Amino acid sequence: MKRFYKQVTKAPVEGGWQVQLDGRGMKTQVGSPQVVPSEKLAQLLAKEWDDQGEEIDPKSFIFRDMADYAIDVIAKDRDELIRGLLLYSQTDTLCHRADPEDALYQRQLELWEPLVTACEAKHDIRLSRVSGIQHKPQDPETTAKLTRLLEGMDHFELAGLQTLTALSASLVTGLAAMEEDAEAESLFAAANAEEDWQAELWGWDGEAEQRRAMRLQAFTRAMHFLAAARS
């Protein structure tokens, strides 16, 4: 598609901020007003439009797609998304570890335990850790507290958290990424510890390295989206 606009701006509107193309307020891909909660997030969306050349690249609108998902999908059925996030807590990567006699176990302990204990302290919960292939569900009280935590988030926060959690297969990691001092590379490396361990033993192949880099980039962008939405 050819670029059809000249000027990209952002403006305060009822309920938040909206990007404008030649003075016309943007809508989501299904036609809802694309109103976001902060000027900083509107700036991220505006930059995606401003950075387009003569031809528009639909795949470059990462932040727009996340905002549209928040508005068109999550806002209409928050409960379904929350249920999906709670499922990650039951099989959280950071709580499912190798057998203690396995060399990988020590790496997992070093990278994962500080994140798990920080999550417990922050949210006043207790998370079950298991080794090997066994499964142990989280305590009902922990699940209830996590439910209340997620219910207190707006749909933009949930959109960012869902992306972070899916990329890391860990609700603990997703919640850690919402902290102000969170570092994308270290959090992603922790969540990716098993894959990195195998690569250290047997070597990376080009496709695996590329996939990891793309997932890290998506993880980092989701953190930017969240930080901007919450500013």
Image (cartoon, grey):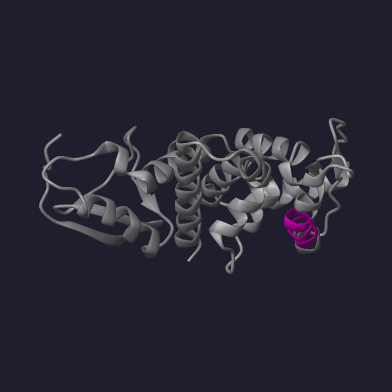
How many numbered discs? 0
Residue at horizontal 87%, vertical 47%?
141
Q: Is residue 112 magenta?
A: yes
Residue at horizontal 80%, vertical 53%?
109
Is residue 92 found left or right of 3 in the rendered image?
Answer: right
Residue 195: give x, y in percent of width and height. 63, 40
Single out the residue that lies furthest toward the front. Answer: 202
Image quadrant in which the N terminus is located:
top left
Residue at horizontal 70%, vertical 52%?
149
| Between 171 and 28, the one nearer to me in the picture | 171
Residue 151 visible from this viewpoint: no
Residue 67: give x, y in percent of width and height. 41, 46
Residue at horizontal 70%, vertical 50%?
172
Whether 85 is drawn above or below 48: the answer is above
Q: Quadrant of residue 113?
A: bottom right
| Between 42 and 189, the one nearer to me in the picture | 189
Residue extent of the magenta highlight: 110-118
Q: Quadrant of residue 138?
A: top right
Single out the residue that lies furthest toward the bottom. Answer: 181
Q: Quadrant of residue 199?
A: top right
Is residue 75 found left or right of 64 in the rendered image?
Answer: right
| Between 186 and 91, the one nearer to me in the picture | 186
Decide whether the magenta segment is chiefly helix, strand or loop: helix
Whether 42 is drawn above or below 204: the answer is below
| Between 211 and 69, the one nearer to me in the picture | 211
Q: Is residue 2 magenta?
A: no
Residue 166: give x, y in percent of width and height. 59, 39
Residue 93 visible from this viewpoint: yes
